[in-house]
Image (spheres, rainbow, N blue to C red):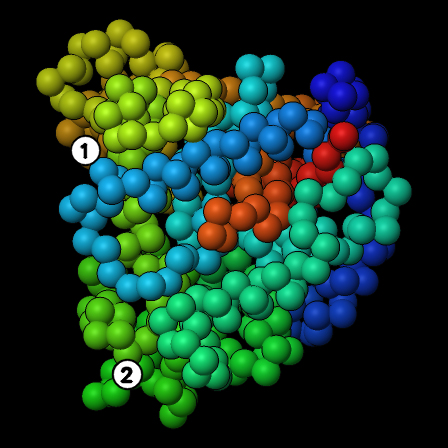
Amino acid sequence: MADAAQALNADGEAAKIDRAALGAAIHAQGAAFQQAVSAGHEHLFSDVALFVTAAQVQQMRAVIAAVEEVVASGEWSVGSGEHGGELGVFYGYDFHLNAQGAHLIEINSNAGGAFLNALLIDSQRAALLPGTAAAEENLEQVLIAMFRREWCLVRGDTPLNTVAIVDEQPVSQYLYPEFLLAQQMLERAGITAHIVDPSALQARDDGLYCAGQRIDLVYNRLTDFDLRQYPQLRSAWEKRQVVLTPNPAHYRRYADKRKLALLSDGEWLRNAGVSQASIAALLQGVPQTRIVSAADAELWWAERKQWFFKPASGYGSKGAYRGDKLTRRVFEEIMLADYVAQRLAVPGERVVAVEGGESQALKYDVRCYVYDGQVQLVAARLYQGQTTNFRTPGGGFAVVRVLE
């Protein structure tokens, strides 16, 4: 199957998606969504599917299960400031796949794209593509059940009535179209949903309000993970006046990139009592990660080509650099900042046919959307350059098909 997947991924004309079916699915979401995806979103969805093997999916699932085991251990949670009963929606486990296997590059606690990928996947279920869609069958029901469970974990049997989808200036965000999809999905389930900037939330004695309605649950898309800039929102969460998902505790538990240094440290894992099977999965699937110290600047410079440097609390690939692309000036800035370095795990490639009929090899990463340790759907992002960008002709979110 590895040879079959490689052959399909190397053929730019192979397994093109059904654009008419995707267009019909977009049209069915209404005029506001159509308008949102028309301007500046030419490279939101790739024309081709990405092929992976069942063995690669199995390895990714094993790494995810191993991470869950570690997170549940007492050693992991010490000093993390745990708070609340929510589990956290939409963890994104991002992998690079290559001949050496699947490599966990990072974990995101507010991973974007799930609703857009659900739309893409559902539009292609009838397409005559090889393999099996890497997603649950009833994605809308699965996603709604996730939000309801987050609510029930804190509020029990009380009905969930209102949700606020919160981000800074949401209409200007590139992934604003998926906020619209989330809003529509929630409202089909009988839940009022507002898409708002945090400034639109009013703090009252009994909680947060929007447009005169008390907000039950906040679906948090903010990238200020500790909510330092939003004390009203953080205070309402700490007082249990609102269910907030994901929240600062989820970020600290999973997405702080310094955690990757522990996940790739065999001695620490053994001392923490992690099972041997999980240790093996992590050491094979998580590239060695180290916290950068300026005291070791000479060694880092000498070895820079072997590493990928990332801000410890960064997001969206901002400030991330391949070591072999570093200038001395940027390197010196990294040495003075809060960074981690991860052994370089090169991404796989998918060939696409671009305008003019030429074939072009694009890099890809694979994102597993996970809730409560369970993979809900698997999607890919095709791109050029150091990091994903949604600016590459032929690139964007791609359907993942599993060859059994």
**In this rendering, would 334 be left or right of 275?**
left
Residue at left offset 41%, top offset 41%: 68
**In this rendering, would 263 be left or right of 226?**
right
Query: Would you name the residue on which mark 2 appears?
Result: 207
Residue 149 x, y percent position in the rendering: 48, 67
Task: Give the residue type that dot 2 points to.
Answer: Gly
Q: Which mark is residue 103?
A: none
Residue 371 x, y percent position in the rendering: 49, 53
**In this rendering, would 20 be left or right of 275?**
right
Residue at left offset 51%, top offset 78%: 193
**In this rendering, would 348 be left or right of 156?**
right
- Dot 1 or dot 2: first in sequence order is 2
Is residue 36 shown above or below 133?
below
Task: Give the residue type that dot 1 points to.
Answer: Ala
At label 2, counting other C-alpha atoms closer than 10 Å, the crowd grade (few under 14, some 14-19, many 20 or more) is: many
The residue closer to the viewer here, 248 or 309, is 248
Residue at left offset 38%, top offset 92%: 212
Residue occupying the far top of the picture:
302
**Does residue 363 appear in the picture of this structure?**
no
Residue at left offset 18%, top offset 10%: 298
The residue closer to the viewer here, 326 or 129, is 129
| Alpha carbon separation for disc pair 1 and 2 | 37 Å
At label 1, counting other C-alpha atoms closer than 10 Å, the crowd grade (few under 14, some 14-19, many 20 or more) is: some
Q: Secondary structure under badge 1?
A: loop
Query: Would you name the residue on which mark 1 appears?
Result: 337
Which is in the foreground here, disc 1 or disc 2? 2
Considering the image in quadrants, where does the N terminus appear? Answer: top right
Residue occupying the far right of the picture:
128
Residue occupying the far left of the picture:
295
Residue 398 x, y percent position in the rendering: 67, 42
Q: Secondary structure under badge 2?
A: strand
Indicate the quadrant where residue 166 lies: bottom left
